[in-house]
Image: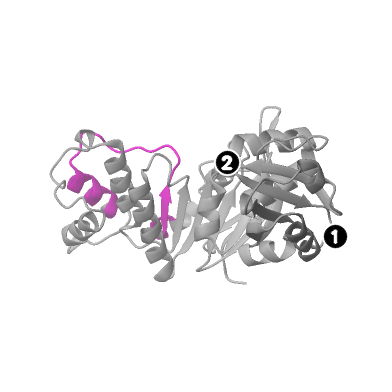
Amino acid sequence: MDSAIRLRGVRKTFGEKVALEGLDIEIPRGATWGLIGPNGAGKTTAIRIVMAILFPDTGEVEVLGHRSALAAKDRIGYLPEERGVYRKLRVRSFLRHIGLLKGMPRRGLDETIDRWLARVELGDVGRRRLEELSKGMQQKVQFIATVQHEPDLLILDEPFSGLDPVNMRLLRELIDEQRARGATVLFSTHVMQQAEELCEHVVMIDEGHKVLDDSVAGIRRRFDLRTILYEPMHDDPDPARLSSLPMVQRVTRRNGTWELHLADGGEPAAVMRALVDIAPPARLEVHRPSLEDVFIEIVGRRRGEAEQARLRRELGGDAPALADGGAA
């Protein structure tokens, strides 16, 4: 496989803390991958090792066919988690400076910058100082600096952080454009819905360990559809009756919808037929697990049910489970 990034057995420690342990990743050229996991999982450490900002204690790193990203720096665009611009510079001067550092020719550079500023709806700010811009505007300028030289490899660390919904949508469009022209895109996020919307493949990290490495389509095939969403047409049924249905492991209620979580091997169709008999449904469907659902399930296996419940509350995943048939 022609790889854009290859990590083999990467381990990184900071004192007694193990940030990464035995990390293997291989990203093919032209792919769009997400590096996902909660804050503190090791995502940024992995990216800094790819970028040769940090060096592994053990393991091998290869970037665009080189043993170090430094040998391919002009072919890489990197947007770090810590945003930063030369605040006293004017916008066009800043972008011109970064472009020249990345090997862009002087001829036509200003025209390229103007096209990009117009593309991100900043066509009138070229002569303004960066310190005069809002944080969101500065982020868009920094994104231009990351992609204006048309890198073969684009690495984005929490790129949507701090953006409003309108600019988040614009950034998704710009990332899609980079992918369409053939760039390899790797971005990290703790917001798993973003990865689900953008990526064809994800690597999930938890406490420095890789816990999942699969295509989004493959994840959907591997993890059973084991949650049924049920809204009765009229009065709510007795919760104890829902909990007592065969193969129903847990019942929750959120925003007027009952969620029936099935045990391994539970057959959704049989439970759905039983629900129709209990009370005519206004809504009855099988819920496809999200990456967030999958992550919580994997972490729950590794750390225990208490941690799984905490993560569900933290991520807004589930309402409290019914206990002994009581209402949530």
Is residue 6 shown to the viewer in this render? no
CA gap, disc 1 to disc 2? 38 Å
| Secondary structure of residue under mark 1 | loop
In the rendered structure, the answer to whether residue 84 lies left or right of residue 124 reads right
Residue beneath the point at 13% across and 49% down: 124
Amino acid type of the residue that numbered disc 1 sits on in the rendered structure: Gly
Asked if the stretch drawn in magenta spans residue 88, the answer is yes
Indicate the quadrant containing the N terminus: top left, top right, bottom left or bottom right: bottom right
Residue bearing mark 1: 265
Q: Position of residue 165 (x, y in %)?
A: 37, 47
274 over 328 or under it: above or below: below
Work out which residue is located at the far top of the displayed protein and give it. 15
Q: Position of residue 144 (x, y in %)?
A: 30, 53
Q: Quadrant of residue 152?
A: bottom left
Q: Which mark is residue 45?
A: 2
Residue beneath the point at 78% across and 45% down: 250
256 over 106 or under it: above or below: above
Looking at the image, do the residues carrying marks 1 and 2 touch, with CB atoms under 8 Å apart?
A: no
Q: Quadrant of residue 271?
A: bottom right
| Secondary structure of residue under mark 2 | helix
Amino acid type of the residue that numbered disc 2 sits on in the rendered structure: Thr
Identify the mark nearer the N-term, 1 or 2: 2
In the rendered structure, the answer to whether residue 119 lies left or right of residue 220 reads left
What's the image's color scheme?
Answer: one colour
Q: Position of residue 243 (x, y in %)?
A: 81, 45
Where does the magenta region start and end? 73-99
